[in-house]
Image: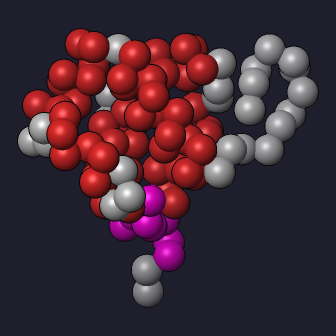
Amino acid sequence: MRLDTGKTLALPKPEETAAAVLQWLAEEPDMFSRFLALSGLQVDQLRHAVGDPGFLAGMIDFVMAHEPTLLAFCEARQWKPEAVVAAWHHYSGPGLGSGEYE
């Protein structure tokens, strides 16, 4: 999903968004260090964590929790924030205000 064409494109799959977020974090040493510090993970634990939907939810939540971080990711990847929001909903499940609870 690129913004530079001016065309409306389908949102990437949540797995693609999660991979892009992880790659972006790895390219941003300060952001990556902050993420590791807040998550409590060590670099050597990442290989096992990336297969865990809970980890992916937390990683995307990290980006979603701070608008400047979300916008920095979107600008770097030339993606719309809606792609991250869609992946966030996929991994985090419905929220209390979603109307999906009875």
102 over 34 or under it: above or below: below
**Residue found at x 13% / y 38%:** 42
Q: Relative to 40, is 51 on the left or the right? A: right
Identify the residue at image location x=52%, y=33%: 20
Q: In which quarter of the image is the N terminus?
A: top right
Can residue 69 be seen?
A: no
Q: Which contiguous range is marked in magenta?
A: 91-100
Residue 86 position, x and y percent, is 58, 50
Q: Examine the rendered structure and indicate whether residue 27 appears above or below residue 1.
A: above
Image quadrant in which you'd find residue 83: top right
Residue located at (56% from left, 41% from top): 17
Q: Position of residue 99 (x, y in %)?
A: 50, 72
| Residue ID at (36%, 23%) | 26
Q: Where residue 47 sits in the image (x, y, percent)?
A: 30, 46
Instruction: Estimate the x, y position of residue 73 in percent, counting from the top left.
Output: 48, 22
Q: Does the magenta stretch include residue 60?
A: no
Residue 37 vs residue 63, the one in the foreground: 37
Q: How many labels does the image show?
A: 0
Q: In which quarter of the image is residue 37?
A: top left
Drawn side of residue 14 relative to residue 49, left or right: right
